[in-house]
C-alpha cells in the first residue's frame, strides 16, 4: 500500500492528521462496532445462558435417574413383602398363635422361600423374618434365636434392646442405613428395609428385614460424580440421609442439606460452602417423598463452559482487529482517488486564484468548485435554450415542406440549432387529434394546445428505444414526428406500427382522447424527409376509409382505380324494402355488409367518397318515400336532418345513417302496433257477441276479417296467450254456469242456448275444462243459490 504524501496533502490536514481519511476510517470502525457490539453482547449472553442451562439439565437428569433406580428397588422390596404374605409356605407362620410350636420343617420351607427371593433379586444382600414376641428369626441361610441373630447382624451403634424394640413395635415401613459387622469384625455399610407383616393386616406378627449392599448404590452415584469434586446424598421422607458418597472428604449432615436446598423445590442451586462455589442439584419424588441431592464443585462442572466463553471472547477480539484492518484498507482505497482529484483541481485553480488554504478537506474543495462550474453552465444553457426550441421548430417545418434544396446547408443549420442528425434512415409520422373540431367549436383552443404538447413529448418517449424523435406542430390539430434511426441498416414496418400504436393507446387510456396516425415510408437521407411527410399526409387522409382512432401506413392505402363498387342498386333497393316494413335490423345488416367489405378490401379515397355520397343519397330517398304526415312527424322529432355532410369517415356516416333509419323504423313500427291494437279489439268484440252461434269457427272468423286461418291462430296465441278454441269454450261455459245455477232448464236446452249442438257436447267440454259434469255442478251450486 502506497503511503500518503504529506507534502502534497498537508493543505487538507487538521492538527497534522488527514481529516477526510480520518473520517473515512472512523466511520468504518463505527459501522463495524455498533452491530458487532450489540449482536456480540446479546449472542454471548444467550450462548452463556444456554450452556449453563444444558449443564444444569444434564446434572438434574443423572440425579433423577439415580433416584428412580433406588425407588424401583424399594418397590421391588414392597413386592417381596406382599409375596411373603401370600406365600403358602410363609403365610401360616404369620397367623400362628405361637410360632415356637411350629415344626422345624416349616422353618426350613420359610428359609428356602427367602433364599429363592434373594436369588431372584441381585440387589438383595440378605432377607430376615423376625417373629414378634418370640425368639425366632429366620433368614435365607438359617434359623436363629434373637441373640444369635444379633451377633450375626451386629448393627453398629444399636444395642440389642433397641433393635428388639424397633422390631417389636414399629408399624411403618422404614429404610435405615446400618453399619453391619461381618465375621471378620469389619464394618460393612448396609441399607436395611423394615416392613411389618402381614401387609394387609392391622395386627402385625412379624417384621421383614431386607439388607442391601450400599456399594451398589454408591457405584451409580460414583458414575455421576465422575471426575468432579463433590458428594451425593439420598434422603427419605423426613429428610434423613439414607445413603451418601463423597470424593472430596466433605460430607454434609441432614440439617445442612435442608438449609442448602431452601424450600425443597426441584432445581439447581448455587451455594457457597467453605469459600467454594457449589452446584447443588435437587430432585424429590412426588410418590415416595425421597430426594436425591448432588453437591458438586462449580469450577469442575463448568470448566468446559468457561473455556468456551473464553474462546468466544477471543474470537470477538480477533473479529474487531480484522475489522479495523479492513476499515483501514477500504478507507485508503476510497480516499486515494478523491485525494488525486482534489490535488488536480487545486493545481488548476492555484494559477487563477489565491486563498486556497481555506478549504477544510478535499470534498469541500470539490463541492465548491463543482458548484461554481454548474452555476456558470446553467446560466450559459438557459441563455441558449431560450430561443433554441423556436429555431428548431422552424427548421423542421421548412424541412417537412421541402424548402431546403442543399443537403449541406440543411446540415449546417441543424448543427447551429443544436440538433445532431445522423445520415439516415428517417421516417415521418403525423398525429391527428380526432376531437379537434369539437374543441374548436367549443372555443377550447388552450386544451387543444395542451394535447399537442403532450403528444409531442409522449411520442418522443415512446420511440426513444429505437430512434431519436423530433416533433413540431404543423396545424391546430396535427403534430409531426420526424424519426432519426441513427444509421440503422433496415427499419421494419412493425417497428413503426409499434411506436405509433403505443402512443395512441397511451392517450386513449390516460386522456380518453383518440388519435389517427399516418406513417410515411422510410427514407434514406435528410432531403427525402419531405417526401415521407407527403406520404404520411396521404395515409392520414385515408381515415375516411379506415375510420378514426387508427394507425395507417402509406403502403396500406389503395391508390389504383381497379377496385369494385361495394354499394350496389340491390343494396339500395333492399334498404328501401326493409324501410317500408319497418325492419330496422334488415337495414342495419345491409349497411354492416357494405362497411365490412370496404374495411376488409382495397378501397381508394375517390371510391370511398363515392360510396359516402351514395349512402347519404339513399337516406334522402328513404325520407322522400314516406307519407307527408310521417315525414313531418320525423322532422319534428329530430328537429333537423342528420348532419351527413359534416361526417369525416365512413364510420361516422354509418352511425348517422343507422340512427336516422332507426328513427324512421320506430315510427313505422308504432303505426303498425296501433293498427294491430284496433284489429285485436274488433276480433274480441265480435267473438264475444257471437260466441253462442253454432257456425262460429276459426275459418268463419278468418273469412269475416279477410285474414288467413294460420295468421288468426298465431294472433290468438300471441295476443291472448290461448288458442281460439279454448277462448271460445271459455266464453260459452261462462254463459252456461249461471243458467245451470239459477234456472231449472234442462242441460239440452242450456247446451242449445250456448252454441253446442247437443247435451253430449256440453257435457264433454264441461268435464274437460271444469273437471265435473254439468249435472253434478247443478247439484252442488244450484241448491246453494236456492
Image (spheres, rainbow, N blue to C red):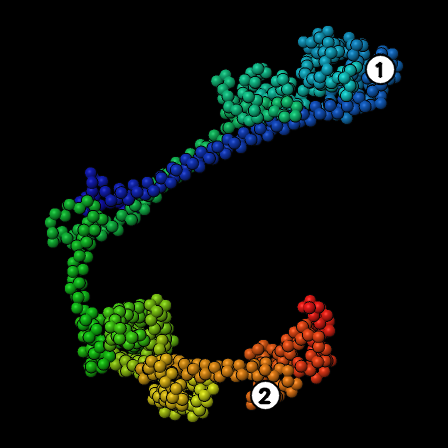
Q: Check disc 1 and report its element: helix, strand or loop.
A: loop
Which of disc 1 and disc 2 is earlier in sequence? 1
Q: Is residue 289 left or right of residue 2?
A: right
Q: Nearer the viewer, residue 597 or 576?
A: 576
Q: Is residue 216 above or below residue 327?
A: above
Q: Is residue 143 left or right of residue 732?
A: right
The residue at the point 38 percent across, 76 percent down is 494
**Could you tell me how far apart the alpha carbons at marks 2 and 1 are, in whole angstroms?**
132 Å
The reply to whether residue 122 is visible in this rendering is no
Look at mark 2 in the image and give the residue it sits on: 702
Q: In front of the other: label 2 or label 1?
A: 2
Q: Position of residue 253 (x, y in %)?
A: 58, 15
Quadrant placement of the C terminus: bottom right
Residue 651 against residue 150 in the figure, above or below: below
Q: Nearer the viewer, residue 775 or 254?
A: 775
Q: Position of residue 359 (x, y in %)?
A: 17, 46
Q: Based on the displayed image, in which of its 4 quarters is residue 378 positioned?
A: bottom left
Residue drawn at x 56%, y 81% as measured from the top left: 684
Q: Residue at x 26, y 75 (%)?
A: 441
Task: List x then y, in percent, for residue 488.
Answer: 32, 74
Q: Which label is found at residue 336?
A: none
Q: Position of residue 542 (x, y in %)?
A: 34, 83
Task: In the rendered view, tell whether residue 94 sits above or below residue 565.
Answer: above
Residue occupying image coordinates x 62% and y 21%: 234
The tag on residue 96 is 1
Residue in the foreground of this view, choosing between 298 and 679: 679
Amino acid at each position: 500500500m502506497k503511503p500518503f504524501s504529506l507534502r502534497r496533502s498537508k493543505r487538507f490536514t487538521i492538527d497534522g492528521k488527514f481529516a477526510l481519511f480520518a473520517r473515512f476510517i472512523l466511520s468504518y470502525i463505527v459501522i463495524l462496532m455498533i452491530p458487532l457490539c450489540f449482536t456480540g453482547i446479546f449472542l454471548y449472553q444467550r450462548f452463556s445462558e444456554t450452556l449453563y442451562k444444558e449443564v444444569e439439565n444434564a446434572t438434574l437428569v443423572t440425579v433423577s435417574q439415580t433416584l428412580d433406580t433406588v425407588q424401583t428397588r424399594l418397590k421391588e422390596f414392597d413386592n417381596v413383602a406382599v409375596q411373603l404374605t401370600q406365600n403358602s409356605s410363609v403365610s401360616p407362620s404369620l397367623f400362628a398363635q405361637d410360632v415356637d410350636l411350629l415344626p422345624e420343617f416349616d422353618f426350613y420351607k420359610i428359609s428356602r422361600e427367602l433364599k429363592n427371593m434373594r436369588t431372584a433379586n441381585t440387589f438383595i444382600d440378605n432377607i430376615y423374618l423376625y417373629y414378634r414376641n418370640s425368639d425366632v428369626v429366620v433368614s435365607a441361610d438359617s434359623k436363629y434365636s434373637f441373640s444369635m441373630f444379633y451377633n450375626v447382624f451386629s448393627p453398629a451403634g444399636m444395642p440389642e434392646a433397641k433393635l428388639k424394640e424397633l422390631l417389636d413395635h414399629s408399624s411403618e415401613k422404614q429404610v435405615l442405613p446400618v453399619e453391619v459387622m461381618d465375621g471378620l469384625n469389619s464394618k460393612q455399610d448396609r441399607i436395611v428395609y423394615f416392613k411389618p407383616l402381614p401387609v394387609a393386616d392391622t395386627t402385625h406378627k412379624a417384621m421383614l428385614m431386607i439388607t442391601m449392599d450400599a456399594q451398589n448404590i454408591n457405584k451409580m452415584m460414583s458414575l455421576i460424580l465422575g471426575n468432579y469434586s463433590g458428594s451425593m446424598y439420598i434422603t427419605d421422607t423426613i429428610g434423613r440421609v439414607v445413603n451418601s458418597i463423597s470424593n472430596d472428604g466433605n460430607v454434609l449432615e441432614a440439617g445442612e442439606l435442608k438449609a442448602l436446598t431452601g424450600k425443597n423445590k426441584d432445581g439447581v442451586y448455587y451455594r457457597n460452602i467453605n469459600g467454594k462455589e457449589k452446584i447443588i442439584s435437587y430432585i424429590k419424588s412426588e410418590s415416595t417423598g425421597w430426594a436425591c441431592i448432588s453437591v458438586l464443585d462449580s469450577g469442575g462442572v463448568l470448566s468446559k463452559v468457561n473455556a468456551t466463553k473464553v474462546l468466544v471472547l477471543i474470537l470477538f477480539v480477533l473479529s474487531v482487529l480484522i475489522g479495523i484492518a479492513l476499515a483501514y484498507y477500504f478507507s485508503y482505497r476510497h480516499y486515494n482517488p478523491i485525494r488525486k482529484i482534489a490535488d488536480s483541481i487545486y493545481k488548476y485553480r492555484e494559477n487563477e486564484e489565491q486563498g486556497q488554504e481555506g478549504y477544510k478537506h478535499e470534498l469541500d474543495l470539490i463541492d465548491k468548485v463543482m458548484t461554481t462550474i454548474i452555476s456558470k453552465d446553467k446560466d450559459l444553457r438557459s441563455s441558449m435554450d431560450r430561443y433554441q426550441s423556436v429555431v428548431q421548430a422552424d427548421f423542421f417545418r421548412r424541412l417537412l415542406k421541402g424548402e431546403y434544396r442543399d443537403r449541406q446547408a440543411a446540415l449546417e443549420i441543424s448543427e447551429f440549432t443544436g440538433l445532431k442528425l445522423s445520415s439516415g434512415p428517417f421516417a415521418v409520422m403525423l398525429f391527428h387529434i380526432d376531437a379537434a373540431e369539437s374543441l374548436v367549436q367549443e372555443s377550447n383552443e388552450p386544451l387543444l394546445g395542451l394535447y399537442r404538447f403532450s403528444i409531442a413529448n409522449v411520442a418522443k418517449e415512446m420511440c426513444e428505444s429505437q430512434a431519436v424523435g423530433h416533433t413540431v406542430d404543423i396545424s391546430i390539430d396535427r403534430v409531426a414526428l420526424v424519426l432519426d434511426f441513427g444509421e440503422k441498416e433496415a427499419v421494419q414496418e412493425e417497428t413503426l406500427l409499434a411506436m405509433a400504436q403505443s402512443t395512441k393507446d397511451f392517450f386513449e387510456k390516460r386522456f380518453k382522447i383518440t388519435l389517427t396516425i399516418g406513417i410515411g415510408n422510410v427514407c434514406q437521407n435528410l432531403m427525402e424527409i419531405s417526401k415521407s411527410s407527403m406520404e404520411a399526409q396521404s395515409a392520414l387522409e385515408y381515415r375516411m376509409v379506415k375510420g378514426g382512432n387508427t394507425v395507417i401506413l402509406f403502403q396500406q392505402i389503395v391508390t389504383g382505380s381497379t377496385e369494385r363498387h361495394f354499394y350496389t342498386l340491390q343494396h339500395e333497393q333492399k334498404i328501401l324494402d326493409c324501410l317500408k316494413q319497418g325492419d330496422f335490423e334488415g337495414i342495419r345488416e345491409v349497411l354492416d355488409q357494405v362497411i365490412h367489405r370496404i374495411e376488409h378490401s382495397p378501397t381508394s379515397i375517390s371510391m370511398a367518397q363515392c360510396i359516402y355520397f351514395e349512402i347519404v343519397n339513399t337516406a334522402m330517398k328513404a325520407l322522400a318515400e314516406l307519407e307527408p304526415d310521417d315525414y313531418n312527424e320525423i322532422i319534428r322529432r329530430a328537429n333537423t336532418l342528420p348532419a351527413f355532410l359534416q361526417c369525416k369517415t365512413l364510420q361516422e356516416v354509418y352511425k348517422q345513417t343507422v340512427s336516422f333509419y332507426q328513427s324512421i323504423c320506430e315510427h313505422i313500427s308504432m303505426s303498425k302496433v296501433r293498427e294491430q291494437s284496433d284489429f285485436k279489439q274488433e276480433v274480441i268484440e265480435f267473438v264475444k257477441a257471437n260466441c253462442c252461434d253454432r257456425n262460429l269457427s276459426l275459418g268463419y272468423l278468418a273469412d269475416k276479417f279477410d285474414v288467413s286461418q294460420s295468421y288468426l291462430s298465431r294472433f290468438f296465441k300471441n295476443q291472448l296467450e290461448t288458442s281460439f278454441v279454448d277462448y271460445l269454450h271459455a266464453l260459452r261455459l261462462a254463459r252456461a254456469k249461471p243458467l245451470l245455477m239459477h234456472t231449472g232448464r234442462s242441460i239440452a236446452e242450456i247446451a242449445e242456448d250456448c252454441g253446442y249442438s247437443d247435451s253430449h257436447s256440453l257435457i264433454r267440454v264441461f268435464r274437460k275444462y271444469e273437471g265435473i259434469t254439468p249435472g253434478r255442478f247443478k247439484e252442488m251450486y244450484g241448491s246453494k243459490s236456492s
